[in-house]
Amino acid sequence: MCERDRGRYRVVSVGVSGMTATVAAATSAADGRRALLAKERAALVRLGWFTTALVFAPWVTYRWTRRTVCVRAYEVYGTAMLATESGRATCAGMFAIVTVNVVLLAYVAFALSLDRGDSEKKED
């Protein structure tokens, strides 16, 4: 019986019939690395989606609010700030800031929910 340490897993070989045990140990270590890489890849994909949302959601909110909501608010309430284009831009900017905070809050909530799910799996 011969044991050798190769990186993150131990390779154990026992005679001629032990070749299957060596292959099995190497295969299970490779599967573990693939599972870890899959988790990392999934985390990067989620981060990419939230980054995209962080870029485009405020931009779309700004453009839409400046064209519709701020104009309608001026018509209904007659606020002097919304009478000028710069006032409408300021109003739309405030809505865009709220949108950024909503996206960041959603990211934190999503990350915490995943963390709870991982801790529940470890307890089982």
Image: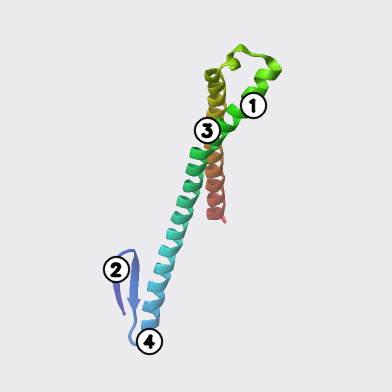
| Nearer to us in this view, 119 or 65 | 65
Q: Nearer the viewer, mark 4 or mark 3?
A: 3
Is residue 2 rendered to the left or right of residue 105? left
Type of residue at label 1? Answer: Val
First in sequence: mark 4 or mark 3? Answer: 4
Is residue 117 placed above or below 54 in the rendered structure? below
* In-front residue for pair 56/112: 56
CA distance for labels 3 and 2: 47 Å
Which is closer to the viewer, label 3 or label 2? 3
Q: Which mark is residue 61?
A: none
Q: Which residue is found at the position 55% from the left and 36% from the top?
A: 60
Q: At numbered mark 3, what does the secondary structure look like: helix, strand or loop? A: helix
Q: Earlier in the sequence, mark 3 or mark 2?
A: 2
Residue identifier under label 2: 6
**Residue 23's spot in the image, x, y percent?**
38, 78
**Cβ atoms under marks 4 and 3 closer than 8 Å:** no
Amino acid type at image mark 4: Ser
Q: Is residue 63 left or right of residue 32?
A: right
Q: Secondary structure at mark 1?
A: helix
Residue 87 vertical placement versus 30 (above, below): above
Foreground mark, 4 or 1? 1
Q: Is residue 17 above or below residue 12?
A: below
What residue does disc 1 label?
69
Asked which secondary structure carries label 2, the reply is: strand
Give the mark nearer the N terminus: 1 vs 2.
2
Q: Which residue is mark 4?
A: 17
